Amino acid sequence: MRRRTKRNVTQKILAHHLVEGGLEAGREIGIRIDQVLLQDHTGTQAMLHFLAMAFARAHCPLAVCYADHNVLQFRPENMEDHLFLRTVCRKYGLWFAKPGAGICHQVHLENFSTPGDTLIGADSHTPHCGGAGMLAIGAGGLDVAAALGSGLYYFDMPRIVGVRVVGELGPWCSAKDVALELLRRLGVQGGIGRILEFTGSGIPGLNLQERVTITNMCTELGATSAVFPSDSQTRDYLSRLGREEAWRPLAAEPGAGYDENLEIDLTSIEPLVAKPPQPDNVVPVSEVAGTSIDQIMVGSCTNGSYTDLHTVAEILRGRRVHPEVMFFVHPSSAAAVDALAIEGLLSHLVRAGVEVAQPTCGACIGIGHVPAPGTRSLRAINRNFTGRSGLHDDAVYLCSAETAAASALTGVIADPREVGRELGIVGPVAALHPRMAERGVGLLAPADEQEAARLDIVQGANIVPMSTQEPVSDPLRGQVLIKVGDDVSTDAIMPASLAALPFRSNVPRISDFVFERVDPSFSARARRAGGGWILAGHNYGQGSSREHAALAPRHLGVFGVVAKSYARIHHRNLVNAGILPLVFDRSEDYEEIGQGDSLEIRGLYEGLASGRLMVIDRDLGRAFGVHADLSRRQREVVLTGGLSAHVKWKAGGRPGTEPEGHLEST
Ligand code: MIC
Ligand code: SF4
């Protein structure tokens, strides 16, 4: 009799939730989804799609939408979004978190995290809750809407990387430095197609908030998810929240194996800094020490917790922020603010001259605190893609809360160990908040079915349902509208600028901002040309989960991307938007093709089915080979014109012309 192989944590969770497929890396699997997370930037499109699919009510056991990004409601459209989300959530069986409750990932961790559960979230940092033993995956809003209505999610089974953690973190070295060390070693493409599972003798020494800082930032590696076991640290954290009943133990079976292995010795971790322009540009802090800085931030879902702000308060207690530095913090939850206030730590911050801002994403995404030209900003957050701060050619350095606070005292980037030595400060411990006084602040429960039937949805004029796209034509002809390089982020494709954000619910309006920071003439050119192609290097669409980076180009007429490779979430978003994501057979061909070249594909439907296509470059006078890594279902989706058109087609409607005959042959 064949013995069942020993299972690691990821396999245990997946096996327990499996509805289709096996646990074989690279093959599509379907799993049951226990929890769904949405937020106010991605939630409106997701909920519009949910309504268009005519689901009666959320089908998974728990779903929550957080008003966390646009907390300051700078424009009336922001509040319109919140009213829509509040009413649609209550009616259709979702919780709603009002502005002020905090950032989705941390508030979800505090109120709903359950070890062993699956979570899908319309935000790329959803792996945050992986620190509490959940299998938590970020996805585009349309995929999340489908999971919300069906309770199911389909994806390619990733390879599982066992990250063996040994040793103990030294003074002034933190979980954030562990995340930066992973980025230093693996780079922003190193986690693609992988789940990182943390194991080893160093794990019990990391408390839950430290764990989530690490899983949160595994997103920057391009990973599908990241997960820790659930142990006494998990139980301790849940009991501080008054939710001990949610705890379950979860560990890999002794002898369980991994597809790949990696080791991190915590003892050798030192304070690190990621220089601009992306999170894997990591160096030891000593290499940039002495660099003058003008602005410092500690916050975001990665570093806005009680633990981080406690650290900052301890370092600054009785001291003053350097006169030439502006220092602000964004706590990541109302509960963190409350705990800091009860303990008097807020006073240490305020008296030191720190601006204590709202529990919201804020400057992490360029909403407020936009740096001035020529200045440098040091931030304990997760991303520093060019322009994300709101300044076109910004210089944002990423670091830990320890390094940020120590540098705030000196006015230059400083090694916190040296500052500690010079000023006689003891390295702060990663403290957890005491037992939480109040739970569920700002959370509205869904209405029961009777009440829900009577509720109306408030849908302001700016909330515009997506129009259904035409199916992709064959032959397919058009110009290369833009040629971009490697690691282009969704922040570059569809900026989250203060000007663009009010139109997340209005794709026609937001499409004016596509590639605004890279080439401000892009949207007008795309419209004039009646659509065309995007040409890109490796890891196209890294970073956020925002499906607007696909929906808006599609609205402008973009029907295809030819790239060397794609980031996971963006690849799916392109398919869902009805944009063909093609891959060069030979990366060298990318070099020859120029912006403005006229490209043509014939025999698209047959080529996609066989996996081989030829693209003719009319200007070069030659053809090059491409392929598409698409499942049969994804081919169907993209050929019908995207997910909404596909849903209608499946329901018997006719999406413009007739792809049915072709589809049968795919
Ligand atoms: C981000 O950090 O870029 C965001 C804003 O949270 C995005 C989601 C969005 O664009 O709405 C993400 O990470 O997915
Ligand atoms: Fe918000 Fe920044 Fe976290 Fe995105 S990365 S959810 S913008 S705090």
Image (cartoon, grey):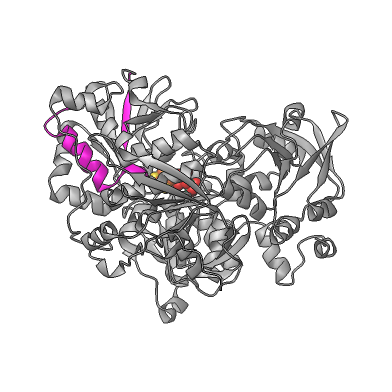
Q: Position of residue 315 (x, y in %)?
A: 18, 33
* 311 within the magenta span: yes
How many numbered callouts?
Answer: 0
| Residue 502 shown left or right of residue 654 in the figure | left
* 417 within the magenta span: no
In the rendered image, the vertical position of residue 268 relative to residue 166, given as above or below: above
Q: Quadrant of residue 540?
A: top right
Seen from the viewer's position, the closer of residues 366 and 265 is 265
Seen from the viewer's position, the closer of residues 88 and 454 is 88
Seen from the viewer's position, the closer of residues 274 and 503 is 274
In percent of the image, x 58 and y 66: which residue is there?
Answer: 30
- The quadrant of the picture occupied by the C terminus is bottom right
Q: Position of residue 436 (x, y in %)?
A: 20, 59
In percent of the image, x 49 and y 39: which residue is there?
Answer: 499
Residue 508 seen in the current view:
no
Q: Quadrant of ligand 2?
A: top left
Q: Quadrant of residue 254?
A: bottom left
In the rendered image, the vertical position of residue 597 relative to residue 432, given as above or below: above
Magenta-highlighted residues: 292-320
| Residue 435 shown left or right of residue 634 in the figure | left
| Residue 505 shown left or right of residue 305 in the figure | right
- The quadrant of the picture occupied by the N terminus is bottom right
In percent of the image, x 79 and y 52: which residue is there?
Answer: 608
Q: Position of residue 368 (x, y in %)?
A: 38, 36
Residue 433 seen in the current view:
yes
In the rendered image, the vertical position of residue 108 relative to residue 396, given as above or below: below
Q: Quadrant of residue 645?
A: bottom right
Q: Residue furthest front?
A: 1
Q: Residue furthest bottom?
A: 450
| Residue 258 shown left or right of residue 173 in the figure | right
